[in-house]
Structures are given as structure tokens and as C-alpha cells.
Amino acid sequence: MAEDQTHRIVITGATGTLGRHAVELLSSDPNTHILLPLRRLDPALAKLPPNVQTQALDLTDAAQMRRMFSEFSPDVIIHCAASGVRPDREDWFAMTRFNTESALQLFESACRLPDCHFIHISTALVYCDQGRPLRETDPLETRHPYAASKAAADLLLQAAAVEFDRRLTLLRPFTFTGAHDGGRRLFPALLRAAAAGQPFPMSPGAQRRDFCAAQDIAEAIRAAVHTPRREAIEIFNLGSGVDLPLRTIVGNVCRELQLGVDLQFGALPYHPQEPMHLVADIDKAAQLPWKPRTNLAYAVWELAQSTYPGLAVCRPRMTYE
């Protein structure tokens, strides 16, 4: 598809880290009209450009969803919404139902529209740990509850795409951060500890990780929107491709930001279902075309500026080059 083609895009999960980056990036094109279905209005989305509209919607309400799609008639659906990376036990089944049912409800609605491209934001956690950078052809095998629900959605969507001859793109981001990141995730928690002048307890940090800027992942989503169809089902890993121990990644970011915080490696155990090697092979993503450009420390610096503007941090270089 040409870059200047008009698109009507539905984006779910617009209040999340990646969803907000995708909205900001895609709405900058005046030829793009975006609809954001929201369970509830969020003050963070109060000031939207004129080509973005919101609508109250429960993603598991099939009838309401069909009416919305009939009225808006999107040609692209980007499903970013997800529930529960680390759910409480009482939320386990609710999380699993949402992550599978919302994806299927959206895809079913997309099947009622002509030539609607469905882009599903999955996760790298779906893979079985191979002890090396992961490829899109590697097996899906996980007992991580969130990842298992996303893997189930991935497989069901692929089966549906074949059954109904629909275009499906699965994007599997590896770990990312940047502006709008929050909650119990690694770098928001690190900045919170630094702002409070408290030590930051961590696992031993030997697990090998691949961190990317959320802005770069959003760029890949935009590339997927504009990339001509080659196959009915396409799958792309999205990450930095840089394979380092977590303790090295965190130490490098703190050094570039000159962030004064006591990193207490080994104070916490590893998550029981945590893979020890979660790094992307990103060769295939060049087909979008896409490659990561943003320095991770710069993404964390942007997060610090928006959440803790009084925190003393040094501005690092913006890009890898």
C-alpha cells in the first residue's frame, strides 16, 4: 500500500504504552482516520487530533463491535489491547478469556469487512526458550500465564485466517520501554526508586534480554500498515537484536543517564516462568522494512522526563548511530 493512501484504522489498547505510541505516530498522517474503542475514557487521551475519535466499547461485546465496525468501516485493525502480564491468581481466568476472546471477536468482525488487514500485537514470551536469539519459526511453548493466553490467540487467529482467507499480521515485540510506560514494569520501577532515593532490588540479572524503545515498535506497526501484502499470514519479531544480560542492560542505562540508584542484584528471585534467554532474531523484520534506531537509554530518559521531571538525569544520545 502506498504511504499516501487513506486508511481507516481501529486501534485497541490506546491507553497502554504501545497503543499510545501507535496512535501518536499513525495520527500524524492526515490521510489516516483512527477510531479508538475504549472501555472507559482516559484523561491521557483528552487532547486528540481531529482525525482520531473515541468510542465506548467492551471488546467482548460482539453485537456492539459489529455495529461499530459497520459504521466506521476500517480497512486496518490493530489489536494492542491485552490483560495481565503478571495477573493475580483470582484474575487468571479473566485474563485468559479476555486475551483470547477479544482477539477472536475483533477478527470475526473484521471478516465481515472487505479486505480488512488484521494486525495482532502478540508477545515474544510465546516462544519456547531456545538459548539463542529467537526466530519466527521457533515453536510456541510456554507456561507463563499471560504468554500462554497470547499464544492461544496467535494460533486461533492463524487458523481463522486460513479458514476465511483473511490477511493477518502477527507482531511479536520483545521487551520495550519509553514514554507512557508504567506500573510494575522494570524501568518505571527503577525511576520510581531513584526519585524516592531508595535502593532498587532485582533478580540476579543473569537472564539475557533484548530491550527496544516503544517508539521503534510503533514504527514497525506503521510499517506493517503500509506494507503491501505478500502472504496471507506474516509474522515478525520486533526487538533490538542486542543480546545482553539484564544486569548489563540496566547498568548501561544507569551509566548513560548518570542515574544514582543502588542496584541490588539478587535481592529478588527470578519469576518462576521467566525465560532465561529472550532475545530477537530480527532479520525478517527488514522485510517491513524496519529496524530499531532509538538508543534504549534515550527511551528511558524520555520516560523520566514525563514521569519524574525533577529527577536529575543526563540526556543520552538519541539513536544508535
Image: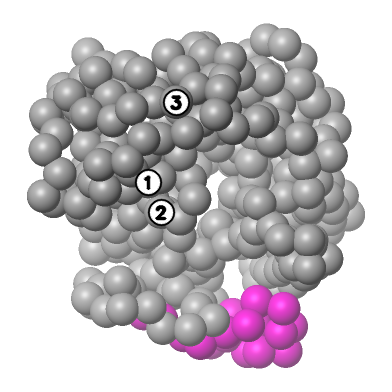
Residue 210 place in picture, x, y as percent: 51, 23
Give amino acid for label 1.
Pro
Asked if the magenta segment contains residue 58, the reply would be yes
Dot in front, 2 or 3: 3
Separation (CA) of disc 2 from disc 1? 5 Å
Q: Earlier in the sequence, mark 2 or mark 3?
A: 2
Establish if 316 lies above or below 271: above
The residue that disc 2 covers is 182
Give amino acid for label 2.
Gly
The residue that disc 1 covers is 188
| Mark 1 nearby-residue class (10 Å; few <14, some 14–19, many ≥20) | many
Residue 82 place in picture, x, y as percent: 62, 60
Q: Is residue 195 left or right of residue 144?
A: left
The residue that disc 3 covers is 264
Give amino acid for label 3.
Gln
| Mark 2 nearby-residue class (10 Å; few <14, some 14–19, many ≥20) | some
Tags 2 and 1 touching, CB below 8 Å = yes
Colouring method of the image: one colour
Establish if 319 lies above or below 303: above
Separation (CA) of disc 1 from disc 3? 16 Å
* SS class, disc 2: loop
| Range covered by the magenta-colored residues | 53-71
Establish if 76 lies above or below 276: below
